[in-house]
Image (cartoon, rainbow, N blue to C red):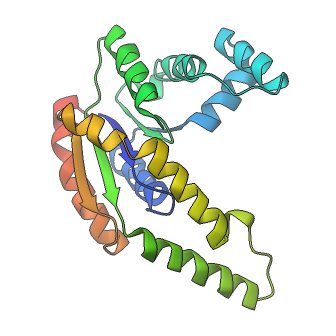
Amino acid sequence: MRIILLGPPGAGKGTQSERIVARFGIPQLSTGDMLRAAVAAGTPVGLEAKAVMEAGGLVSDKIVVGIVADRIEEPDARRGFILDGFPRTVEQAKSLDAMLAQKGIALSTVVELKVDEDALVGRIANRAAETAARGLPVRKDDTPEVFKSRLEAYRAQTAPLSDYYAQAGKLETLDGMQPIDSVTGELMRILEPHAETAGA
């Protein structure tokens, strides 16, 4: 069972990924974690990434796809995986599809958590105010201004993936504004058939 979770920052992807991991026993693959691990392990693609990063450059899609390709060969990912934070663009999605096709595997499904962005901004603003009221420092990521810019980046770069995967017949959507347990219930109903066909 190979899954991509889509949704803007604050949609609850991290929480739901943890529950999928617990239910189906497949790893959640974060590109940031995979990149650091590949660099630390000194793999060929990790060394390539290290050279780019040390030169102050951005790691290319080709390198990231190479790191994903290596990671999904590891034993814990043989039965499936959840991709977190990748792909971020349609170009990355096409590269991912090509790499998976070379390996003779395909994505099982792509689930998008639909949310009300204004409500998310309000939630972040409340959290920041509560944190400040307790006399604690507010993380830069938790300010409404930074959060709004992250939402804008998501809309510009990542939101087009919805259409891309819908056209491929892979997209399922659900209401991410429901209570967390309700979202989990719907998510499990979507994923269960894929677990059966994958033998996971």
Q: Position of residue 166 (x, y in %)?
A: 22, 39
Up the image or down, 181 lies above or below 90; here it is below
Instruction: Give the image location of residue 79, x and y in percent.
Output: 34, 28
The quarter of the rendered structure image containing the N terminus is: top left
Please tell me which residue is depicted at 34% across the width and 75% down the height of the picture: 179
Residue at x 44%, y 26% (from the top left corner): 91
Q: How many marks?
A: 0
Q: Residue 62 placed where, x, y %?
A: 55, 16
Closer-to-camera residue (137/40): 137
Q: Left or right: 62 with respect to 18?
A: right
Q: Which residue is pictured at 26% across the width and 55% down the height?
A: 187
Residue 37 versus residue 110 in the image, above or below: above
Which residue of the protein is positioned furthest toward the bottom in this rendering?
133
Q: Quadrant of the C terminus?
A: top left
State the residue at coordinates (38%, 46%): 5
User: Can you tell which quarter of the image residue 199 is in?
Assistant: top left
Question: Considering only vertical position in the picture, is 132 above or below 106?
Answer: below
Left or right, 13 with reference to 171 = right
Residue 69 % position (x, y): 49, 18
- The answer to which image quadrant residue 195 occupies is top left
